[in-house]
Image (tube, grey):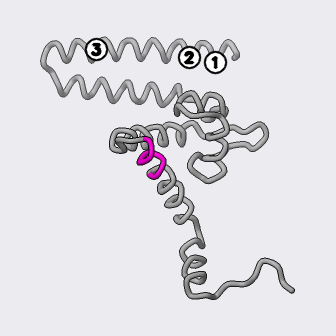
Amino acid sequence: MTKREQRALAAGFITLEDTLHRTEDALQNGSVEQALSELQETQHAIAAMRPAEIDVAQAAAALGVSKPTVRAWARRGLIDIVRQQPMLLAFASVVDLRRDLERLRETAGSEKRWQSLLAAAADQREFAQEGAHEGFAEAVAGNTEPLIRT
């Protein structure tokens, strides 16, 4: 990390500390409007500090899964890939997936249900890709071509 990046990071943390203290003060004084405003400022400060990309190990730790699982999810389109070798992932897509996983974990109840929900989410993401609907419709109609021609 360069000195410039270190200074920017330090400034970002100072901003976060300040806004969190102002939020706490606003809540203690009963000013919900002020607290919400301070939280929005905190969100902006976090967004400015957020990296554009994250490596597989960091994503695995953030998501609470293994590195092979992260790679598989990235290949299936659940996480946006920024670079293939070494694999770097879009930080924002990891954060989005983490929120989705938290919601799924809350509603799943059991490990079996959790795995079913994950599989369904992956299938929905694949089905949303361009051409998937048409391909599925053609397959259902029997308009397919063999992979190996004889």
> Between residues 148 and 30, which one lies in front from this camera angle?
148
Q: In what element is the residue under mark 3?
A: helix
Q: Earlier in the sequence, mark 3 or mark 1?
A: 1
The amino acid sitting under disc 1 is Glu
Q: In what element is the residue under mark 2?
A: helix
Residues at marks 3 and 2 touching, judged by CB atoms closer than 8 Å:
no
In the image, taking residue 147 as reference, residue 9 lies left or right, namely left
Residue 112: in magenta span: yes
Residue 93, x across and y down, in percent: 54, 42
Q: Residue at x 33, y 16 (%)?
A: 20
Marks 1 and 2, Cα distance to the nearest angstrom? 6 Å
The amino acid sitting under disc 3 is Arg
Marks 3 and 1, Cα distance to the nearest angstrom? 26 Å
**Residue extending furthest toward the left:** 30
The amino acid sitting under disc 2 is Leu
- Tag of residue 22: 3
Which residue carries the number 2 mark? 9
